[in-house]
Image (cartoon, rainbow, N blue to C red):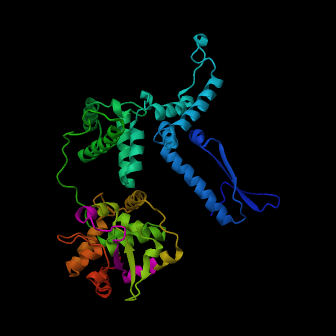
Amino acid sequence: MDNKYLTLKGRNKDTWYIQVRVPKNLQKVVKKPFIKQSTKSSDIKEARKQRDEIVGQLKSLEERNAQGEFKLLVDNYLGIDKDKLLEIQEQVTDGLRAEYPWIGHPEQGDLPIPTDAEMVEADALSYLITGKMKDKYKLTLTQAMAQNWRYSDYSDKTKSSHKKAVERFNKFLNSKDFQVGSIERYHALEFKLHLEQNSKLANGTISRHFTDLGVIWNYARGSERYTYENPFAKHGIKVKASRESYAAWDIDDLRKVVATMKDERDKLVVYLAWYTGARLGECLSVRPEDIYKDNKSGIWVVSIKPDRAIEDYMNKIDASAKTENARRIVPIHDALLNPLKNFKIEGKGWKRKLPNSYSNYFGRQKKLVKDPVNTLTKHYCFHSIRHNVATNYENANVKESISARLVGHSTVGATMTYGYYSEGVEFEEALEAVNKLPVL
């Protein structure tokens, strides 16, 4: 609702104008330091819409710029025929000669030469025309990572993992951003030794770093055609066969955590998990329009989209599954109905929209609960709530065929656990099962 970058101008002060400063690292691509334009409208909503489109385009350019200015310029000129490229190259070269007329002359001496920043556009054009790339533009780890993200649909959690692996590897090599093509096997082996001896990281985390770095290296290999083996492969890091299990919550302890929360929407995330068995990512995927009354039965339900990990799993076991539409529809527990209706009416969405953000918040609130007898260790986390739901259904003698669909469990021989209950379990029967869950 803000009017940032918007100003009323015109003879009658009745037309909105946009003025946005272009980040310095994008000015060479955008070709100007400011974007100034009229919205040709007196409607503030239309002005904000146009403003948001421009800001969004700049943000997208900044994300692409993480791949390196050279790559961004190459992408910018892709699809232009060679004659036109030669014409642009001549204009750029003429500009450099006007600034540095002595380049290439015997009397040049100690006179300054163009900086890398000034040469990057000429070098990008030269690469597109000749196919030859200078060594200084070979991919760095950060650039390879950013480019790989463009072609692969990774979750925020996976991207964060990639960033951490690259950050630690660069720090170990005392490099701002190491070139991928310069990484040798001994670099990886020394990095492994360093992490094992000088960090408190678990072997599982170290192994994940090597997997992430290997993925980034493989992307660079495809782009720059390395002929040697992936230095991050076959690292021999031993990881425990089983993961540490999470302890189910005592209902009174979870109530204490919820009591520390001030915003009703933060509390609602916990309630939603408690009464549906939804994972954190699934809870935060629920939108106001996903809460509605079923026309046939008159029962209020919530539509829950499977999170990325479950989508990937479903695709593996059932290639025909339309996971975007494969939502599980869960009847709403009586104690959850009014809070979800309020969430729908308010239409604000969640206060913390990313799983990592909410998970960190939940961990902080958990630490506020002081109990000298039963300390809430890391074994008690948000995901533990899902274990409670499964156990509560079992204790209430709800059939596994019903509870599995309600919680979204995959069972042997049942690939599509997400879907409408008219396919097997009617809403009335499902609601009866849901209302057997204890009130939080």
Q: Residue furthest right?
A: 11
Tell me residue 75's x, y (percent): 48, 42
Residue 297 visible in the displayed image: yes
Q: Which residues are magenta?
A: 313-340
Q: How many marks?
A: 0
Give the residue displayed 65% in from the left and 56% down from the top: 4
Q: Quadrant of the N terminus?
A: bottom right
Residue 392 visible in the displayed image: no
Give the residue displayed 26% in from the left and 68% down from the top: 387
Q: Quadrant of the C terminus?
A: bottom left
Given residues 176 and 59, the one toward you in this image is 59
**Within the image, what quadrant is residue 416 found in?**
bottom left
Give the residue displayed 18% in from the left and 50% down from the top: 240
**Within the image, what quadrant is residue 157 found in?**
bottom left
Give the residue displayed 47% in from the left and 71% down from the top: 264
Tell me residue 10's x, y (percent): 79, 57
The magenta stretch spans residue 21: no
Reply above or below: 255 against 230: below
Tell me residue 217's x, y (percent): 32, 39
Tell me residue 193's x, y (percent): 25, 34
